[in-house]
Image: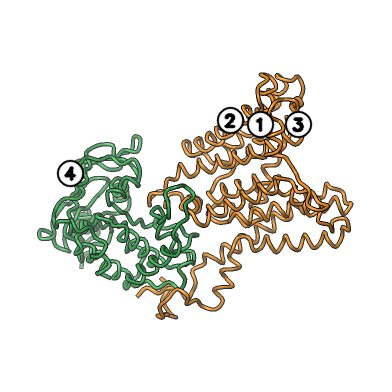
Chain colours: A orange, B green
Amino acid sequence: MIPATGQVAAPGLARRRPGLRLRALLGRPEVGALAAAIVIFLFFLLVAPSFRSAASFLTVLYQSSTIGIVAVGVGLLMIGGEFDLSAGVVPVSAGLVNSMFCWYFGVNLWVGAVLSLVFCLLVGFLNGWLVMRTGIPSFLITLGTFFVLQGANLGVTKLVTGSVSSRDISAIDGFGSLQKVFASSFAAGSATVWITVLWWVLFVGLAAWTLQRTRIGNWIYAVGGSAESARAVGVPVVRTKIGLFMTVSFLGWFVGMHSLYRFNTLQAGNGVGNEFLYIIAAVVGGTLLTGGFGNALGAAIGAFIFGTTSLGIVYAGWDPNWFKAFLGVMLLLAVLVNTYVKRLSTAVSPREGGLT
Amino acid sequence: MTDTLAEHADRNLRRGEPLVELVGVGKNYGPIRALHGIDLRVGAGEVTCVLGDNGAGKSTLIKIISGLHPHTSGRLAVDGADRRFGSPREALDLGIATVYQDLAVVPLMEVWRNFFLGSELVSGRFPLAGMRIREMRRIADQELRKMGIVVSDIDQPIGTLSGGQRQCVAIARAVYFGARVLILDEPTAALGVKQSGVVLKYIAAARDAGLGVVFITHNPQHAYLVGDHFVILKRGATVLDAARGSVTLTDLTTQMAGGDELAELSRELERPS
């Protein structure tokens, strides 16, 4: 045991050692990502003249939101100590279920949208249930669902439509109202604001509230930090984790609806690789790969870095292939910073030890 | 620190009345018999010490009482009613709180979050109801101070506290949430002399407040300081079951050190003087 050397006896919560505040600030998961986001954004402002407008900023936000909505869910899931590799293709499956069901049976698109929602929640439930039931790492279970969905997306689409893309559904009942909800945009001055940006802000806010201020948030941190300890004090570990998987697939459904009602048709082979973008966004945002640490704002900043870079490279006139290389570098840097921060925030302070 | 225990203790506890009773309890993990034929009685206001070497079945026994693993044979009664726990939550709801040596806390979470984990104060019943964070921080700080634990910041991750402090936070939490039976798994194993003293005083205080205490240890000295009843396990079975009056510290120490096997060993190793 470490002997108590600097015993402090003054009462009150406000008594903090100098330096502790700075340590607490640096220990916040999103600080590194925020600094990186600002540097990258300024960099592209400098090198790409066409980047310097409100319109392109809003395009960046739109691009970020399409990744960011699912990334927030993936971030929550990773804080809860699990992975979901099927998150990349779930949006495509969601859109295909909706569009092909309604096209084949000729029913209102809202029916298909609800059916697709039930389907996605079921996929999430199955992921979580299998992980909890079998004890097999979620990495493997969701790798399985990822391949099943990827294959089924292509196979079923070919069976129903005879090609690898779904049919145009813009003439079916309900298209207009669904498009309003999931894929509308409005003008703000010279710029266009896509509704997904607002949805993204809403989901990030909701996730942040849940994590920091609710009992469920407490449970999410606990099941990721130490599932056995959490279970021992009565936290419903199984329900919490299954709920997280279902949250991810719900958000996947949401983005799937956006793609469907924005483009009318979907390519059945799309979505592969996006699961890694979500994980990268969460990790760059300070989420610990081993669970128990991170927050919603971090994942949002991670997605913003993705949006800035993917468009910045285009605006700067560079070969867009460099984008993947850049993401890889960001990921490695983020992991280094995270590891350092975790060590900093959990090291037993030499001056701690007020057991009297 | 004794006042805080009396303050949170169940007032209906009658000294000596049985809280938890095990009759012939056994546990098999597949073909492996981890525990068999265990009788144990935890009375209000009594400390029952469970001693035994590594692998004797101590951990399995407390996991059964605390609801982590259900037993496979025999019966477990709480307040006279037969039970078979499906989860720790069920045991906690009956007032059986366990402080585990290795599972006490979630290291990366703040001290106050750990204190209230699983029993958070919320401002409504709907799922996204806010927690009463200010109140929770204040109570956690206050309760820890009463136990003599002064943390410089209630918001710091509990992983930054020393092992003894973490153990004490876990005990303070169990007591605060109205435990009637307190199970302590090797609470003094990782502690120095002074910190062990704090924990032992706490066990005595819990006993005096009328709680039933199950104290798991492999240190007969510590057990004899506070125990009313002693059970020694060996290879999953009871080898000694005695009340305080009918056993001496020497008996306990000898039994713990191996008893007859030790006598055998000393004959074998005897050296001509």
Q: Is B254 or B12 nearer to us in this picture?
A: B12
Q: Is residue A139 left or right of residue A237?
A: right
Q: Is B222 or B117 nearer to us in this picture?
A: B117
Q: Earlier in the sequence, mark 1 or mark 2?
A: 1
The three-letter code of the residue at mark 3 reads Asn
Q: CA distance from mark 2 to mark 4?
A: 47 Å
- Residue annotated with mark 1: A93
Q: Nearer the viewer's eye, disc 2 or disc 4?
A: 2
- The residue marked by circle 2 belongs to what chain? A
Asked whether residue B265 is in view, the answer is no
Q: Is residue A131 left or right of residue A55?
A: left
Instruction: Classify 10 Å Cα crowding around label 2: few (below 14), some (14-19), many (20 and above).
Output: many
Question: In this rendering, is residue B76 above or below B17?
Answer: above
Q: Is residue B238 left or right of residue A340?
A: left
Asked whether residue A172 is in view, the answer is yes
The reply to whether dot 1 and dot 2 touch (C-beta < 8 Å) is yes
* Residue B1, image x, y percentages: 28, 71
- Residue annotated with mark 4: B80
Q: Is residue B57 left or right of residue A73?
A: left
Q: In terms of secondary structure, where does tag 4 sit?
A: loop
- The residue marked by circle 1 belongs to what chain? A
Q: CA distance from mark 1 to mark 4?
A: 55 Å
The quadrant holding residue A287 is bottom right
Q: How many marks?
A: 4
Instruction: Classify 10 Å Cα crowding around label 1: few (below 14), some (14-19), many (20 and above).
Output: many
- Residue annotated with mark 3: A264
- The residue marked by circle 3 belongs to what chain? A
